[in-house]
Amino acid sequence: MPRAGAACLTCRQKCRKCDRGRPSCQRCVSKGLVCGGYPERFRFCGIASRGKWKGARIPTSSRSSTGGRSEISNAISDTQVPPAQEVTETTHLDSEGDQASAAILNGSSKTTPKGLSVSEKPSEAYSRPLLELPDDVTTLLDSPNTARLLSHYDEIICPHQIAEVGDDAENPYRAYILPLARKKIGLLYAVLGLSASHLGRITGDEFLHEATAVEYRMKAIRALSEEIRKSQRTSLLEDEQDTVLAIIQVLLLHDISESGVSSHGIHITGAMSVCKQLLIAEGLHGRRQRAMFFLGNLAWLDIIRASAGPERMCFSQDIRELVACASDRKFELVNGCPREVFLAIGAALEKAKEHTLGWLTWDEYQIALLLAKHKLYAWDPKGREYPSHEPRWLSIAEAFQFACILRILRLLDPLKPASSSDIQDCVRRILDATAMITPDCSLLEILVFPLFMAGSDCLSRHSQYYVLTRLRDVERRSEFRNPVPVDLLRKVWDARAAQAEDDHTNISWTAFTHFPGLARQHDYLII
């Protein structure tokens, strides 16, 4: 029996069955993915031009229509796209803002980036019909489902996003985001999407986790795209500016809770486009603590993603200095990293980006990194103020200090053996510092990045086991499961174990975060 034709490019890339629906296959639509279309080498004479599809209607995008598929959906495509390939669309855009908003729209689906495994969900998860989502805030707030999801965000998600403050009324994820969400529907969609995804996962409700959350998320991304385009035409009001930054942060939290990866780096790139407009218009300053809170968190996430590849850095050192000067204690409470260390590693990664782009010679690059390394070694964590009198903040500061030193050492010499004394000294200092934080301490939840950096150069089984145990402690306490740190560490450790006994060349974790076939790399949010 002849095959029914090639699968769509998205299904071929993910090596799964495709129902060959047009213009978009129903499998992609039901999973909330952007259907990549069909290879151009196949010539089609319109929809359902002959055979069993003759006279058939164009498949609809309703997720409720999962039953009654043709047997054609069970055919497997002849050709599979290798994992290193990526299907991308190129669109001519006139401005940076258009590029950012288009990138956000193109990345609106909840895709799983290559390099991460994901299991297929049964189609029964979509057997319940999706409710029509209203386009005005008042109607959406009146929905019982909205009240349930906002309550989950308020009571379960918010307390784990900031150390020490926890369930207090001054928690900025509650005090800043919820009032804005009750006025701005785009942010409300983003919050509901995050809450639906998290609640659906912990309760085992696949429909809530897979279908409802994706619907809210896509609405939020469309609203964000409209705001970014609007910012290119006219000045945004303060609430509108803060809403854009808040939507981006909530979408990133959604990425972290789902896969730990932000597809194609779209969200932080979009934030940078808006930030430039605000800075030009002098719309950001220390008196706007709500905006500075969001900007500080995004600037730290920019450093996290640039750790996997300096060329991915978007924020400038000027913005980081603004954050360091104007942010209050919430910056450390959310991100953990002392702002002096934040500035030092940010400057080093910016120099690495300039060298990658050919703007710095090798000698200039090495000198800049050596200066940053000496600056971090000389920094004394005992000589600064911390968000509270909790003595364990000193251990937090030391963990981040040596995690950033370790990153600079790897920039200086990526192939340096992990057994080198300076590398192992950093690992020991990080592990000793994190050992001071007990599982019942809220500060544990901000230690993912230092633990990961130490784990990437751990050589002994017991130290690797310790890192995994601490990361599991973080997951249990925070109720957020970010699979990226453990997945990357296991790949590094397995690759090192497969090396010949006399081969001591370093296996860098960054090798597992870069895909040459991608025009825009994914963001690995190790946080």
Image (cartoon, helix red, strand yellow):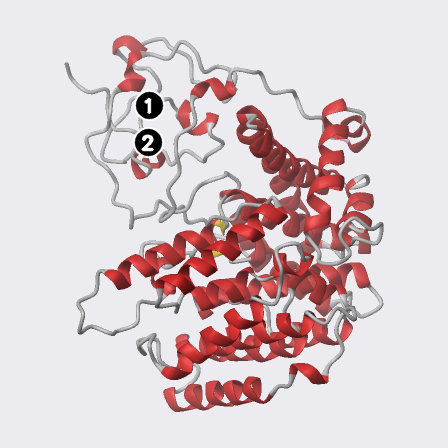
Residue 443 sits above or below residue 378 on the image: above
| Left or right of 364, for residue 237 | right
Q: Is residue 110 visible?
A: yes
Residue 417 sits above or below residue 284 on the image: below
Count of marks overlaid on the render: 2
Residue plotted at (44% across, 81% down): 359
Mark 2 closeness class: few <14, some 14–19, many ≥20 residues within 10 Å: many
Residue 416 sits above or below residue 396 on the image: below
Q: Nearer the viewer, residue 369 or 518?
A: 369
Please name the residue that numbered disc 2 is placed on.
8
Mark 2: which secondary structure?
Answer: loop
Q: Quadrant of residue 3?
A: top left
Location of residue 172 in the rendering, given as x and y in whole percent from the top left corner: 78, 54
The amino acid pointed to by label 1 is Arg
Q: Kindly report the distance in space between the C-alpha atoms of the residues bearing marks 1 and 2.
A: 6 Å
Residue plotted at (48% across, 14% down): 65
Location of residue 117 in the rendering, given as x and y in whole percent from the top left corner: 37, 42
Q: Quadrant of residue 81?
A: top left
Please name the residue that numbered disc 1 is placed on.
20
The amino acid pointed to by label 2 is Cys
Location of residue 260 in the rendering, given as x and y in whole percent from the top left corner: 50, 50
Q: Nearer the viewer, residue 44 or 276?
A: 276
Specify the quadrant that holds the C terminus.
bottom right
| Left or right of 493, for residue 179 | right
Location of residue 58 in the rendering, given as x and y in whole percent from the top left corner: 42, 17
